[in-house]
Amino acid sequence: MKFGVVVSEGPYTHQAADSAYLFVKAALDNGHEVPRVFFYHDGVNVATRLSVPPQDERNIQENWTALAKDHDVDLVVCIAAAQRRGMLDENEARRQGKTADNIAEGFRISGLGQLIEMGIQTDRLVTFGD
Amino acid sequence: MTTKKFLYVNRKAPYGTIYALESLEVVLIGAAFEQDVSVAFLDDGVFQLTKGQDTGEIGVKNFSPTFRALGDYDVTKLYVEAESLAERGLTKDDLQDIQYEDEDDDYAEKPSIIIVNRAEMADVMADQDVVLSF
């Protein structure tokens, strides 16, 4: 089966990003496809490469980056939600005249259309959030 | 393009958290994809449709007028749960008058808000291909 996944709560505060990660891994391990994960609301904060959690804790961003690399999962961060929350890639930082960017490898910033498209193109859409 | 039945479920109050506003942003963008769209309002989500909203003193944008424009985006089915209204002391008269022009009926103006009970709301949800919850 082909799954689309939405993460709609922020990392560490809420288990959504962890549960979604475990779900995607389990789905892939069981022969399902997960072409895309869409990060919305505070879920966009998962994509920062500047978080430094204690060493004995899981690193949520690094988990996702590794998953994207190993299984070719498209990690899309909503641009409207990202801009409100200070999540910028290199292009957006330049375009908005900001001095830094913070999007981690494996994630890309794009529009809400990617969420709708994912709903259309997958068999099931699964949301992790409140 | 495949046409699927999309339902956007709104459960939270319009202000206090950003969910309602960011839900509406998805509905508006999603309209461009020409899918069969419905929007549901239940729990505190029914407050999103109330009339006379004034956010002047809380420093956030009042986005409630946008609901009246949904008809122009072909979003014409707004399901509101009767029990959620009653539990909050609200009636249909507390909600905005939201209409759309039915192009199959000589552009007659028709109400977009459909009041359903809890069991009917369950049927609406069961009938969908894609449910996005906010």
Image: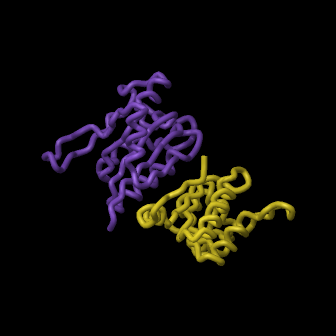
Chain colours: A yellow, B purple
How many numbered tags mark residues here?
Answer: 0
B63 horizontally vs A8: left or right:
left
Percent x, y of residue A81: 56, 58
Q: Residue at image x 62%, y 60%? A: A44
Asked whether B2 or A84 is in front, the reply is B2
Asked whether A124 or B50 is in front, the reply is A124
Question: Is residue A99 in view from this perspective?
Answer: no
Q: In this view, which residue lies farthest toward the top?
A: B89
- Say above or below: B88 vs B54: above
Question: Is residue A15 in view from this perspective?
Answer: yes
A25 horizontally vs B77: left or right:
right
Asked whether A29 or A17 is in front, the reply is A29
Percent x, y of residue A86: 64, 61
- Say above or below: B53 vs A38: above
Q: Residue at image x 69%, y 74%? A: A66
Which quadrant holds residue A5?
Answer: bottom right
B20 horizontally vs A62: left or right:
left
Q: In this view, which residue lies farthest toward the front?
A: A30
Percent x, y of residue B51: 40, 32
Q: Residue at image x 36%, y 54%? A: B5
Which quadrant holds residue A33?
Answer: bottom right
